[in-house]
Amino acid sequence: STGRPSSKELSVEEKLKKAEARIKFLEAENDLLKKLEELERQALMKKSY
């Protein structure tokens, strides 16, 4: 796979599966960033004491 979109049209089911997978990925990324932000906030609070 070259990472380029394929030239054939995707079926509605394929488009839906891709969209659902993308949503799952973005939700996981969002959760990770929230956890990282919280850890950074905690580290800053400890540093200020």
Image (spheres, grey):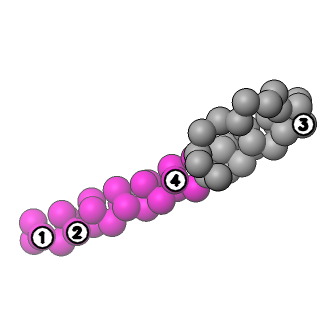
In whole angstroms, how far apart are the C-alphas of marks 2 and 3? 45 Å
Circle 2 SS class:
helix
Task: Identify the residue position indicated by label 3 in the image.
Answer: 13
Rendered-image quadrant of the C terminus: bottom left
Q: Amino acid at mark 3?
A: Glu
Report if the CB atoms under discs 2 and 1 are less than 8 Å apart: yes
Pick whichever, 2 or 45, lies toward us. 2
In whole angstroms, how far apart are the C-alphas of marks 4 and 2? 21 Å
Pick whichever, 44 or 49, lies toward us. 44
* Category of crowding for the residue at label 4, using alpha-carbon neighbours closer than 10 angstroms: few (below 14), some (14–19), many (at least 20): few
* Disc on the earlier residue, 4 or 2: 4
Q: Amino acid at mark 4?
A: Glu
* Disc on the earlier residue, 1 or 3: 3
Work out whether 32 lies above or below 8: below
Q: Is residue 18 left or right of residue 27?
A: right
Spot occupied by residue 8 in the image (x, y as percentages of width and height): 79, 30
- Say which mark, if any, is on residue 29: 4
Q: Amino acid at mark 1?
A: Lys
Task: Identify the residue position indicated by label 1 in the image.
Answer: 47
- Say which mark, if any, is on residue 43: 2
Residue 7 included in the magenta stretch of the image: no
Spot occupied by residue 6 in the image (x, y as percentages of width and height): 71, 36
Q: What residue sits 59% from the left and 48% below the top?
A: 2
Q: Amino acid at mark 2?
A: Ala
The quadrant where residue 38 appears? bottom left
